Amino acid sequence: MVVSHSDKKFIVFLQDELALSIGDIAVALRKYELENAPLPMLLWQYGLVSIEQLEQIFDWLENQEY
């Protein structure tokens, strides 16, 4: 999987702000490739983030410049 600059920023956010491990992120990325579902929803669906953390993710994503 090729990771873009914005994807790298998102992964850093997950690690730094939400304290997700590289292993947790790797699991979600594998599911993302297989299921083609939004990564934030996969993180929540597999219990890797709480609903409050999911809201933080959406807030962060909304505030990013594209």
Image: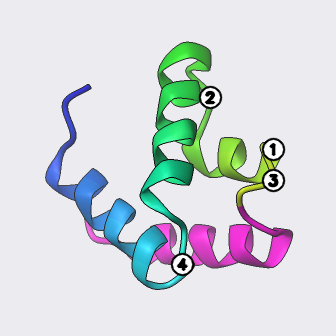
Instruction: Write down the residue under mark 4.
Output: 19
Image location (x, y in percent) of residue 51: 84, 69
Residue flagged by tag 1: what amino acid is it?
Gln
Furthest residue to the bottom? 17
Q: Is residue 41 magenta?
A: no
Q: Nearer the viewer, mark 3 or mark 1?
A: 3
Q: CA distance from mark 3 to mark 1?
A: 6 Å
Task: Please tell me which of labels 3 and 4 falls first in the chain.
Answer: 4
Label 1 Cα neighbours within 10 Å, binned few <14 / some 14-19 / many ≥20: few
The boundaries of the magenta stretch are: 49-66
Q: CA distance from mark 2 to mark 1?
A: 11 Å
Labels 3 and 1 touching (C-beta < 8 A): yes
Q: CA distance from mark 4 to mark 1?
A: 17 Å
Instruction: Write down the residue under mark 3.
Output: 47
User: Measuring 81% from the left and 44% from the top, which residue is drawn there?
Assistant: 45
Labels 2 and 1 touching (C-beta < 8 A): yes
Left or right: 59 in relation to 51? left
> In the rendered image, which quarter contains the C terminus?
bottom left
> Which disc is residue 45 wearing?
1
Residue flagged by tag 4: what amino acid is it?
Ala
Labels 2 and 4 touching (C-beta < 8 A): no
